[in-house]
Image: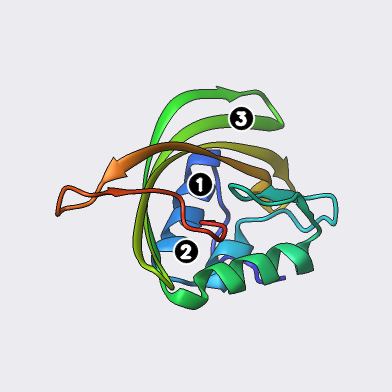
């Protein structure tokens, strides 16, 4: 499991590093955000729950195989306690698929736990949201595969 070069001191830092990793198609950076625990889970839009670090790594390697995922994350709610935090996020996503560029608005739930290594992601669940228009005015929906 890759380790970040610095202690991720807040859930916001972890979340920012996670989305930056997606935007740079950097699987190592994405995985450095996850807790070193086999009970972690990721559910991508339209996908089955994926449990464990190796399976999540493979999921992101496959998703980022077409290149970076441009994500603009906007928080709708944050809750933080001493050892856990929950963020609900609206994600505005642009991604290249085999059929061209797909644009979607997704809804995500990010769950973080405070570990001896700092805050880490333990669950990421993304659900399909609304269709948005492309620059040429056409509507682009969720591609046939999983967005992220």
Residue 120 position within the rendered picture, expressed as x and y whole percent measured from the top left:
65, 48
Q: Going from the N terminus, do you reach mark 1 or mark 3 first?
A: 1
| Secondary structure state at the residue bearing disc 3 | strand
Q: Going from the N terminus, do you reach mark 2 or mark 3 first?
A: 2
> What residue would you read off at disc 3?
86
Q: Tell whether label 3 touches label 2 (CB within 8 Å).
A: no
In depth, the one of 67 and 76 nearer the eye is 67
- Residue drawn 46% across the image and 62% down it: 22
Badge 3 crowding class, 10 Å Cα cut-off, few under 14, some 14 to 19, many 20 or more, is some
Quarter of image, res 62 = bottom right
The correct choice, above or below, for 80 with respect to 131 in the image is above
The correct choice, above or below, for 93 with respect to 28 in the image is above
In depth, the one of 61 and 15 nearer the eye is 61
Structural distance between the alpha carbons of marks 1 and 3: 11 Å
- Residue drawn 61% across the image and 30% down it: 86
- Residue drawn 47% across the image and 34% down it: 89
Residue 25 position within the rendered picture, expressed as x and y whole percent measured from the top left:
45, 71
The correct choice, above or below, for 74 with respect to 60 in the image is above
> What residue would you read off at disc 2?
21
> What residue would you read off at disc 1?
15
Q: Where the C terminus falls, by quadrant?
A: bottom right
Q: Going from the N terminus, do you reach mark 2 or mark 1 first?
A: 1
Q: Tell whether label 1 touches label 2 (CB within 8 Å).
A: no
């Amino acid at each position: 499991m890759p380790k970040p070069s610095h202690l991720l001191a807040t859930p916001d830092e972890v979340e920012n590093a996670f989305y930056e990793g997606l935007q740079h198609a950097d699987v190592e950076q994405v995985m450095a955000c996850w807790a070193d625990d086999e009970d972690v889970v990721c559910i991508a839009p339209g996908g089955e729950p994926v449990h464990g670090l190796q399976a999540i790594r493979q999921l992101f390697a496959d998703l980022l195989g077409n290149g970076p995922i441009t994500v603009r994350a906007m928080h709708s709610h944050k809750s933080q306690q001493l050892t856990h935090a929950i963020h609900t996020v609206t994600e505005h996503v642009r991604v290249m698929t085999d059929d061209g560029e797909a644009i979607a608005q997704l809804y995500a739930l990010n769950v973080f736990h405070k570990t001896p290594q700092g805050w880490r992601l333990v669950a990421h669940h993304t659900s399909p949201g609304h269709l948005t228009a492309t620059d040429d005015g056409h509507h682009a929906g969720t591609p046939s595969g999983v967005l992220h």
